[in-house]
């Protein structure tokens, strides 16, 4: 039995969409493959972006975030959403799709080549797991909150921050519950506000957004799940009162945009300018159009995400509330299936749960973060929340992961 088929049969023994691959289930072949993938990724980066191999022992004490007091620190998380493979990104043949990452961002970041996601590979549940630091097992296709406290709840409760200080910009209407858990010690009233740009646009066009169909596409994964695309008075209130955008200006600007992620970045910029939240989470999703099976659309999604990540980084450097005090994390929720796995259909889906689609990466940039350094030790997707906690000063007591020593 190959490692692929053995992994697949383990996954099948669990229950479909609720499958969660635990640490102990990963056999040594899978771990070897994850390690090999991470080494290869490291070599691609060393060759092309000129990064050097970091040492955890040397200089792991950061420059105390370059003197930024804890109260002023901000964190922006960008999920490189929808899942991309190395052959369309970091491998030599893929690097032309990510020129901004390769030439602008990677030389300024600490790059981790082996971030393993051992949870369910569905976008909502995987993003919820990134946000709680626990592999969540909620149904990916239901409107349910995460079961464990989110980073937003730890942040707001521990540091007594107001609702306006934590925001999520979410790509799909299916993400409307991501801002707060139903955990009894946290939950309602303590989470992030969630803004759904498609809801805003639907509300602004009174549901008659025929000209905006390309911005309103939702959930590429299954035709059987169509999350409600609503828009209400509340959304218009968000638009005008919080974002200081008139309905007409918003509609006019939206006409110049080409995709849902561009719409999300536009809204995220407005949020940064008007409310300057200290914890901002932006989830991209354009790449997931791969489920439609068109390779060219998938690659176009990667190129757009690459550009939008660089645009956001530039915005952070020029917004006075953010410049010089913001740590940025860019990471995918997970990858996509390899061409070799007969259980999948290559780039199109993320169904096999193979090590390739589980072994992702993360970039970190900002004050005190070492630049142009790559680490290849194995991290977990669940390490993100405790790491954010160490930076902002909250304690993610229920998270499964650990703070990343190279960053805290
Ligand atoms: Zn997908």
Image (spheres, grey):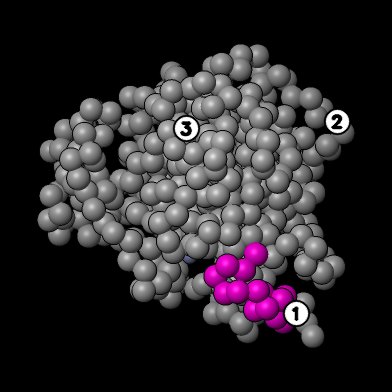
Q: Nearer the viewer, mark 3 or mark 2?
A: 3
Residue beneath the point at 35% across and 54% down: 173
**Of callouts 2 and 1, which one flags the residue occurring earlier in the amino acid sequence?**
1
**Of callouts 1 and 3, which one flags the residue occurring earlier in the amino acid sequence?**
1
Residue 396 percent across, percent down from the top left: 65, 35
With 19 as the anchor, is 275 left or right in this view?
A: left
Residue 47 percent across, percent down from the top left: 72, 51
Residue 222 percent across, percent down from the top left: 40, 72
Closer to the camera in the image, 402 or 333:
402
With 371 as the anchor, is 162 left or right in this view?
A: left
Q: Nearer the viewer, mark 2 or mark 1?
A: 1
Quadrant of the image for the N terminus? bottom right
Q: Which residues are magenta?
A: 4-20
| Residue at mark 2 | 58
User: Are the residues flagged by discs 1 and 3 in contact, CB closer than 8 Å?
Assistant: no
Callout 2 crowding tier (Cα within 10 Å): few <14, some 14–19, many ≥20: few
Residue beneath the point at 57% across and 74% down: 16
SS at badge 3: loop
Residue beneath the point at 23% across and 39% down: 234
| Residue at mark 3 | 190
SS at badge 2: loop
| Residue at mark 1 | 6
Q: Can I make out residue 205 in this image?
A: yes
Circle count = 3
């Amino acid at each position: 039995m190959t490692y692929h088929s053995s992994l697949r049969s383990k996954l099948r023994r669990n229950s479909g969409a609720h499958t969660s691959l635990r640490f102990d289930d990963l056999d040594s072949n899978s771990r070897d493959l994850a390690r090999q993938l991470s080494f290869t990724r490291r070599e691609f980066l060393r060759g092309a972006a000129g990064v050097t191999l970091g040492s955890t022992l040397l200089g792991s004490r950061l420059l105390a975030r370059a003197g930024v007091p804890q109260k002023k620190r901000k964190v922006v998380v960008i999920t490189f959403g929808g899942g991309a493979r190395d052959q369309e990104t970091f491998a030599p043949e893929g690097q032309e799709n990510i020129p901004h990452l390769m030439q602008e961002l990677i030389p300024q970041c600490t790059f981790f080549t082996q971030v393993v996601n051992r949870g369910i590979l569905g976008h909502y549940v995987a993003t919820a797991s990134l946000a709680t630091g626990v592999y969540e097992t909620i149904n990916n296709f239901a409107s349910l909150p995460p079961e464990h406290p989110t980073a937003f709840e730890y942040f707001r409760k521990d540091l007594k921050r107001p609702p306006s200080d934590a925001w999520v910009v979410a790509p799909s209407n299916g993400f409307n519950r991501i801002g707060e858990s139903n955990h009894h010690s946290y939950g309602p009233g303590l989470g992030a506000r969630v803004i759904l740009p498609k809801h805003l646009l639907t509300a602004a066009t009174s549901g008659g957004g025929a000209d905006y169909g390309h911005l309103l596409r939702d959930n590429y994964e299954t035709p059987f799940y169509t999350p409600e695309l609503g828009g209400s008075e509340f959304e218009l209130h968000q638009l005008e009162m919080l974002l200081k955008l008139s309905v007409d200006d918003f509609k006019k600007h939206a006409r110049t945009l080409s995709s849902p992620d561009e719409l999300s970045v536009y809204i995220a910029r407005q949020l940064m300018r008007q409310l300057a939240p200290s914890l901002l989470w932006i989830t991209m999703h354009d790449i997931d159009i791969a489920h439609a099976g068109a390779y060219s659309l998938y690659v176009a999604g990667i190129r757009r995400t690459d550009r939008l990540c660089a645009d956001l980084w530039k915005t952070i450097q020029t917004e006075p509330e953010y410049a010089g005090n913001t740590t940025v994390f860019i990471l995918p929720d997970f990858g996509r299936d390899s061409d070799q796995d007969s259980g999948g259909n290559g780039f199109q889906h993320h169904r096999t749960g193979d090590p390739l689609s589980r072994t992702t990466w993360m970039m970190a940039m900002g004050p005190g973060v070492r630049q142009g350094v790559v680490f290849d030790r194995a991290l977990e997707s669940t390490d993100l929340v405790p790491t954010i906690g160490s930076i902002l000063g909250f304690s993610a007591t229920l998270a499964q992961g650990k703070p990343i020593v190279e960053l805290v």
